[in-house]
Structures are given as structure tokens and as C-alpha cells.
Amino acid sequence: MDPVFREWLIDFGSSGYIDLYRFDGETATILAVQHQKEAGY
């Protein structure tokens, strides 16, 4: 199965974080975590 790249929005206080991860069917690998304000959300 080809890996799928996804974003997961994580609420934290009045803002939150964006987690970029790869899912290959069995394993999720976190590639990056960025604060929502830095990402322009």
C-alpha cells in the first residue's frame, strides 16, 4: 500500500497544532508539528 500523507489538527487552548504524518496501512509516522498561528490558520 502506498503511504498517504495527512494533516491532523490538534486543539490546544485558543489555538492548536498541525501534525503532518504518513500512514502506510499499519504505521503512522509523524513528519512535522507546527503551531496553527505559524501555519496561517
Image: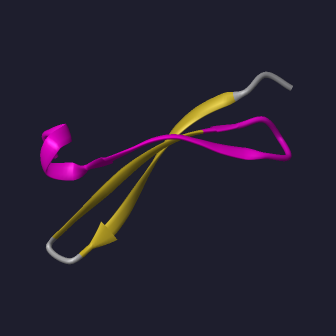
Q: Which residues are magenta?
A: 22-41
Indicate yes or no whether the magenta region holds residue 27. yes
Rendered view: 14 above or below 9: below
Q: x, y (%) of residue 32? A: 44, 39
Q: Position of residue 16 (x, y in %)?
A: 26, 63
Could you tell me which residue is drawn at 53 percent across and 38 percent down? 6
Q: Residue at x 14, y 73 (%)?
A: 14
Residue drawn at the location 15% of the way across and 42% of the way down: 38
Q: Residue at x 28, y 73 (%)?
A: 12
| Residue 9 coordinates in the image, percent (x, y) | 38, 56
Q: Observer-nearest residue: 33 or 5? A: 33
Residue 37 forms part of the magenta stretch? yes
x and y, in percent, of residue 15 in the image: 18, 65
Asked where in the image residue 29 lies, by quadrant, the reply is top right
- In the rendered image, the vertical position of residue 12 relative to residue 1, given as above or below: below
Q: Is residue 19 left or right of residue 21?
A: left
Q: Nearer the viewer, residue 40 or 31?
A: 31
5 to 14, vertically: above or below: above
Give the quadrant of the N terminus: top right
Number of numbered discs present?
Answer: 0
- Tell me: 23 left or right of 25: left
Q: Which quadrant would residue 4 be assigned to in this image?
A: top right
Name the residue at the bottom extreme. Answer: 13
